[in-house]
Image (cartoon, rainbow, N blue to C red):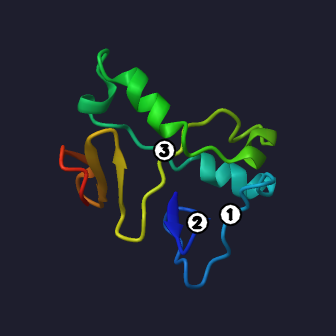
Amino acid sequence: MRRFAGEIYEWGTDPLSADPLPQEFPPEPATARRVSTHTVGLPPALTHPGAIDATIAALEGNFFAGWQASSWLREQLVLVLDENCQTRVRDFLISYDDELGVVAVHDETGLS
């Protein structure tokens, strides 16, 4: 997912021309199904046994109450990237690259 101007948009859509996804109620079933296919694998630095619990806790911060009523989206962890296709998870700067996929760079400074 992508956050733009405070709204959440489906990955691959243009926030300037697409409608934002609802957060307080579930998306239409066809939209929810499509959104559920936008999955990515996280790098090992975020998923190894010593890191996975903290990563899950961080991703649980992207909780959209309305999505829990959708059989497609219920209990899913959501990675939300900003306008620059970046986010911070723990002490990693996460970005998405069309060729490399999800990239995690360790950054203890806390600055983007």
Q: Residue 102, can we see it?
A: no
Q: In x, y percent, where is residue 40?
A: 42, 43
Mark 2 or 3: the one toward you: 2
Q: In x, y percent, where is residue 70?
A: 78, 42
Q: Which residue is mark 1?
A: 21
Tell me, yes or no, whether the two marked residues, 2 and 3, touch with CB atoms within 8 Å: no
**N-term mark: 3 or 1:** 1
Identify residue type, mark 2: Tyr
Determine whether the residue tagged by mark 1 lies in a helix, strand or loop. loop
**N-term mark: 1 or 2:** 2
**N-term mark: 2 or 3:** 2
Residue drawn at 73 percent across, 61 percent down: 22
Q: Which residue is mark 3?
A: 39
Foreground pick, 6 / 12: 6
Tell me, yes or no, whether the two marked residues, 1 and 2, touch with CB atoms within 8 Å: yes
Q: Is residue 57 above or below residue 73?
A: above
Residue drawn at 68 percent across, 75 percent down: 19
Q: Is residue 57 above or below residue 100?
A: above
Q: Which mark is residue 48?
A: none
Q: Which residue is mark 2?
A: 9
Q: Residues within 10 Å of mark 2 (few under 14, many from 20)?
A: many
Disc 1 versus disc 2: distance between alpha carbons? Answer: 5 Å
Q: Is residue 13 above or below residue 80?
A: below
